[in-house]
Amino acid sequence: MKIVKSKVYVSENRLVNRLEALYENVPSGTCAGCTRCCSESVNMSYVEFLNIHEHYIGDGSIMDHPDFVNRLIRYYLLELVQPMKCPFLNADNLCDIYMYRPLPCRIFGNTTKAAYESNYKEIKIQNVKVAYQLLQESNLKMPKNVVQKEIGFCEDYIVDERLDRNEVQSMYDALVNMDGELAFKGFLKPTEFNQNLVGWFIEALLDEIDPKVLLRTMLSDLRLEALKAANLG
């Protein structure tokens, strides 16, 4: 299993230590706990996914977490149809992986407004590209409230200092370098760079289930069926 071998490499080569050192550069602050920012499947590096998988799943199976699996699959199937909360947000409105959350979650509220708006501009461009691709390939329209969804800059997060665009970019560059090392060692394909949180865990879930190809096709088809239903509504 690729994940197991990847985690062994990450541990033996102290990539987790580098990741933790990177996280320590993010200023600490006080969060109001409104969960407004927990409204999308953030893009993240493979090394961050492996870190989350290690602490949340360990050596067990994703199927050992049925509540999470239900939230994960529901998010995957419906994210193109309606705005949704992150599947790691549990029934108590708390983040299951807060201690190991990825960089985008850590810097939310910690950046200057200019840095935040610059980053979110890229996210909205990505959303438009996905919507256009679906329209061209499947003649399906994503709902406008999904394509144009925006999480406003957090004014409630209290922090003494904020990261500017250069500081944020430097952190992302460090993550890219770690993923580049994993790619060089054959643990990551170039096409797999910068997937989102749900995407990584869906792939990990599929890796546990046999036959994988059948389930992957079924999930993909159901996802499109959900979008068709939304277009008929």
Image: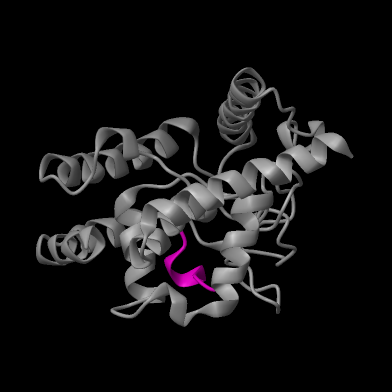
Residue 24 is left or right of residue 154, and the answer is: left
Which residue sits at x=15%, y=66%? 8
First to last magenta residue range: 96-101
Residue 13 in picture, x, y percent from top left? 10, 60
Evaluate whether residue 28 shows in this view: yes
Residue 103 in picture, x, y percent from top left? 44, 51
Which residue sits at x=48%, y=31%? 165
Q: How many marks?
A: 0
Seen in the picture, residue 138 relative to 194 is either above or below; the reply is above
Seen in the picture, residue 139 relative to 109 is either above or below; the reply is above
Decide whether residue 98 is among the magenta residues.
Answer: yes
Q: Quadrant of the C terminus?
A: top right
Residue 130 in picture, x, y percent from top left? 59, 28
The scheme the figure's colours follow is: one colour
Quadrant in the picture for residue 16: bottom left
Which residue sits at x=65%, y=60%? 74
Which residue sits at x=33%, y=40%? 192
Residue 147 is left or right of residue 26, and the answer is: right
Residue 146 in picture, x, y percent from top left? 74, 38
